[in-house]
Image (spheres, rainbow, N blue to C red):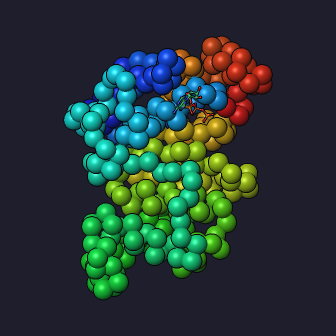
Amino acid sequence: MTAALLQVERLSKNFGGLQVSADIDMELHPGDRCALIGPNGAGKTTFVNLVTGVLSPTAGTVRLEGRDITGLSAQARVRLGLVRSFQVARLFRSMTVREHLELAILQRERRTWALFASVGRTRGLAGEVAGLLATMGLGAVADTAVGQLAYGQQRLLEIALALALKPKVLILDEPAAGVPHSESQRILDALDRLPPDLAVLMIEHDMDLVFRFARRIIVLAQGRLLCSGSAADIAADERVREVYLGSRGHAAHRA
Ligand SMILES: Nc1ncnc2c1ncn2[C@@H]1O[C@H](COP(=O)(O)OP(=O)(O)OP(=O)(O)O)[C@@H](O)[C@H]1O
């Protein structure tokens, strides 16, 4: 077993008297393909906010490569390799896909001041952009303005921008949300091409995608870790069925 990249111990969060995360333990290792699921209000978003540093926990620790990062800002965590791809696009509609990726890489390298002078000259930039385009299947639209992209392609660009930050741990926040079914296969294909050593935690409501992507699924209910296991384990787990039925009155096809 490899050493854990991300280690979460007894992570808890109270909002006033309401305990929204309760004693959550979790580990991610290099190459993990893990999904976090749970019914509405289970505490998935809060958990991710605690891990990424958007919220401070009431108790518990978060470690990255053994280092306690519980007190670090979200930005500092990104610099250490803990990166989240946001569901809400913050893309510039008139800029092309390639320009977005160049900007993200230069920002990572903190060379934005020299942006226009250095784009053509920055060694390795074109190659790195080409690699990201290939990984995410965006080569054919590299020089298309983002405003012209299909929605699924915009979502792929969001993941490419997260990858441009060279993450060790990537948190994917509902990568298929709002994407028509006809385009979701493209997202799955792209996720299959993610770097093999990257540890990925996906929060996703689309159970088809979760079951096809994840080798391990973690289920949260009422702020607690209910269970974790393979897709087959989770699909067969009576407790999972109960929390979904109890919360929404229908089966766990859409979480
Ligand atoms: N800032 C806050 N103050 C008070 N309560 C909050 C706050 N943020 C979240 N909550 C509550 O915490 C609980 C968990 O919310 P959270 O958004 O983490 O769940 P979720 O699993 O991500 O839900 P969904 O699938 O609907 O996005 C909910 O009951 C929510 O109302």
Q: Quadrant of the N terminus?
A: top left
137, 178: nearer the viewer: 178
Pinpoint residue 72: horizontal percent, then vertical percent: 27, 41
Note whether residue 24 is visible.
no
Q: Residue at x 63, y 14 (%)?
A: 239
Q: Is residue 31 left or right of residue 155?
A: left
Residue 114 at x, y percent in the picture:
28, 80
- Which residue is rendered at x = 64% and y = 27% of the image? 39
The answer to whether residue 246 is seen in the rendering is yes
In the rendered view, tell whether residue 175 sits above or below residue 236.
below
Q: Residue at x 53, y 65 (%)?
A: 91
Image position of 18 (left or right of 26) = right
Judging depth in this view, the residue of 83 and 234 nearest the camera is: 83
Residue 153 against residue 204 in the figure, above or below: below
Q: Nearer the viewer, residue 152 or 76?
A: 76
The residue most toward the left is: 67
Q: If the image is split into quadrants, where does the C terminus sit?
A: top right
In the displayed image of the protein, which residue is found farthest to the front? 16
> Residue at position x 63%, y 72% from top?
147
> Along the horizontal axis of the image, is 140 left or right of 122?
right
Q: Is residue 209 left or right of residue 107?
A: right
Using the rendered view, name the quadrant where residue 171 is placed: top left
Q: Quadrant of residue 154?
A: bottom right
Residue 131 x, y percent position in the rendering: 41, 67
If the picture is divided into quarters, which one holds ligand 1?
Answer: top right
The answer to whether residue 54 is above or below residue 112 is above
What x and y, as percent, mark residue 128? 36, 69
Quadrant in the rendering for residue 62: top left
